[in-house]
Image (tube, rainbow, N blue to C red):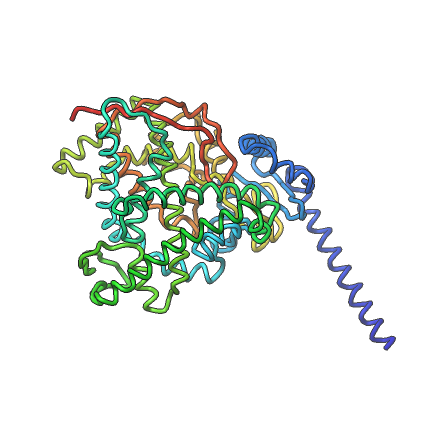
């Protein structure tokens, strides 16, 4: 008995020695990283009580002070580091070492479950492989007509009002981007659903508001605790409507497939050719390809719901990028005129149509890219280091939460001369050639980059081209005066209005 106790004590002592040695080594690494020594739990609470605008300014001041790497330690003494130098961003994003998303993404699970955004390891790799065909170029070409149709619908809604029309951009554009993503993702048109369109649009806006609220506030609380609050109860109600509608559409679409077994006749796993897909009665949708994957045992109905939920929510945030682009064009009339001339010339060459010529709008694409540089939809993304990560100036320990400061690197004067100036020529081929590949990453970068970036670019081109072709844009609210919030998405806190002045075509 005595020997057993002695051995247990020796084992405990060994564990303590190893733990102490690890702690000393860990602290040595932490102390070499620029930044404050730590942020107490009281400080974290205070950070969550100040306004979102003040928090964003505080974060930017803090990261500027300790450029290019700055250290945070949250109230559980977990190391959090913000990085913004392209070399450091490349260390984290390139390759397959640091693919795990931060635990902060867990707050999204009630909305999307374990989808392509939140999955890790081999589960993420297999899901990404299943989803890749959904965004194949030939499939996206089938969506182009839907996106252009929605751009025309937006233009028509403005033309129904005589004279100059003033619109708060994000609410106005969100309605149409939601229509577009629902038709491309699920094969349904909200415009044909009357009153339900407004109810569903309202639910989406409530979801976005809650997502923003939760990312900031749930720094302190778990999903379980949040579910007991008034916001949590509101979330449960909204999600029941949101997920219930998606489940209904999935069920109806699967019944349709049973009655049209040749829907995916001649479908190739290697290279999708949309022209070989039987397009009987209903247009192709992302949901159809996911149903096919489920028939092959690659996805469950729950998996499909998670991915479609994610597509819809993420697709609506294209409205933010479109809004910023329109705002910048309104404030830069000479650039707006160049965009309009390109659109007019392209349409004239294609018998007044844009369907197959969106790819030819190179100047418009440069404008969108420059708008995403100045106002990336996602200003920050977070990863966790799976091993020690050697940055330019320091070594990050295993398990470090890394905030990749996209907004910071996009406005870094070391890589972008006069970074506050809107200049689409930054993206001319000769100017891109020698630029660091990780100095511009509005859709993230590396293996876990945004799978829908080509779809997003097509959607933005289709809607902006239709508006610029039919209207002159004038600013009402200037971007420099808009307050920006520190949230999951880079949204202005104030209304962002521009005037649409009809053209005589």
Q: Is residue 93 toward the left or the right of residue 452 in the image?
A: right
Q: Residue at x 23, y 40 (%)?
A: 358
Residue that extends furthest to the front in the rendered view of this protein:
195
In this view of the protein, which residue sits in the foreground, 220 or 105? 220
Q: Residue at x 67, y 48 (%)?
A: 76
The relative height of residue 204 versus residue 240 in the rendered view (above or below) is above
In this view of the protein, which residue sits in the foreground, 455 or 494? 494
The relative height of residue 92 versus residue 472 in the rendered view (above or below) is below
The relative height of residue 40 versus residue 501 in the rendered view (above or below) is below
Q: Is residue 223 toward the left or the right of residue 271 in the image?
A: right
Q: Position of residue 46 (x, y in %)?
A: 64, 36
How many numbered circles are shown?
0
In this view of the protein, which residue sits in the foreground, 20 or 104? 104
Q: Position of residue 59 (x, y in %)?
A: 57, 34
Q: Is residue 210 toward the left or the right of residue 182 in the image?
A: right
In this view of the protein, which residue sits in the foreground, 233 or 68? 233
Residue that extends furthest to the bottom in the rendered view of this protein:
1
Q: Position of residue 24 (x, y in %)?
A: 73, 51
Based on the displayed image, in which of its 4 quarters is residue 21 positioned?
bottom right
Q: Position of residue 193 (x, y in %)?
A: 28, 47
Residue 416 appears in view: yes
Residue 359 appears in view: no
**Quadrant (top left/top right/bottom left/bottom right) for the C terminus:** top left
Based on the displayed image, in which of its 4 quarters is residue 367 positioned?
top left
Based on the displayed image, in which of its 4 quarters is residue 330 positioned?
top left
The relative height of residue 157 versus residue 390 in the rendered view (above or below) is above
Q: Residue at x 33, y 23 (%)?
A: 332
Residue that extends furthest to the right in the rendered view of this protein:
2
């Amino acid at each position: 008995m005595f020997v057993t106790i002695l051995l247990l004590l020796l084992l405990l002592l060994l564990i303590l020695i190893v733990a102490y040695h690890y702690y000393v080594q860990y602290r040595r690494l932490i102390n070499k990283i620029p930044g404050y020594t730590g942020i107490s739990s009281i400080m974290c609470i205070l950070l969550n009580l100040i306004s979102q605008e003040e928090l964003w300014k505080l974060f930017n001041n803090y990261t500027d002070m300790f450029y290019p790497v700055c250290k945070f330690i949250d109230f559980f003494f977990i190391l959090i580091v913000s990085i913004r130098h392209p070399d450091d961003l490349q260390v984290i994003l390139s390759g397959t070492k640091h693919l795990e998303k931060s635990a902060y993404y867990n707050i999204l699970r009630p909305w999307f479950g374990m989808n392509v955004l939140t999955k890790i390891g081999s589960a993420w790799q297999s899901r990404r492989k299943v989803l890749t065909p959904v965004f194949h170029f030939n499939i996206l070409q089938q969506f182009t007509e839907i996106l252009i149709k929605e751009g025309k619908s937006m233009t028509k809604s403005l033309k129904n009002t005589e004279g100059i029309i003033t619109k708060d951009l994000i609410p106005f554009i969100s309605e149409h981007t939601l229509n577009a993503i629902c038709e491309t993702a699920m094969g349904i048109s909200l415009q044909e659903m009357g009153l339900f369109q407004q109810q569903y649009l309202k639910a989406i806006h409530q979801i976005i508001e809650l997502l923003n609220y939760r990312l900031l506030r749930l720094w302190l609380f778990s999903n379980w605790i949040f579910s007991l609050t008034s916001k949590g109860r509101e979330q449960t109600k909204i999600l029941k409507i949101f997920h219930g509608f998606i489940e209904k559409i999935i069920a109806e679409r699967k019944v349709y497939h049973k009655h049209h077994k040749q829907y995916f006749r001649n479908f190739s796993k290697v290279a999708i050719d949309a022209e070989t897909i039987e397009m009987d009665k209903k247009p192709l949708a992302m949901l159809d390809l996911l149903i096919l994957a489920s028939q092959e045992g690659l996805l469950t109905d729950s998996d499909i719901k998670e991915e479609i939920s994610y597509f819809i929510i993420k697709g609506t945030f294209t409205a933010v990028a479109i809004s910023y682009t329109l705002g910048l064009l309104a404030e830069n009339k000479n650039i707006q005129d160049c965009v309009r001339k390109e659109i007019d010339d392209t349409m004239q060459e294609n018998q007044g149509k844009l369907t197959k010529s969106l790819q030819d709008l190179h100047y418009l694409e440069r404008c969108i890219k420059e708008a995403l540089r100045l106002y990336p939809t996602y200003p920050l993304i977070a990863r966790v280091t799976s091993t020690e990560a050697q940055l330019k100036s320091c070594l990050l320990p295993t398990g470090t939460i890394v905030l990749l400061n996209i907004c910071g690197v996009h406005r870094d004067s070391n890589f972008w001369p006069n970074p506050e100036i809107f200049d689409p020529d930054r993206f001319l081929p000769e100017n891109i050639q020698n630029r660091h590949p990780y100095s511009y990453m509005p859709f993230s970068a590396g293996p876990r980059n945004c799978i829908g970036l080509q779809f997003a670019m097509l959607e933005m081109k289709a809607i902006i081209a239709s508006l610029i072709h039919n209207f002159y844009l004038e600013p009402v609210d200037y971007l420099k005066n808009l307050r920006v919030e520190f949230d999951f998405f880079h949204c202005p806190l104030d209304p962002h209005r521009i005037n649409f002045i009809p053209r005589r075509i």
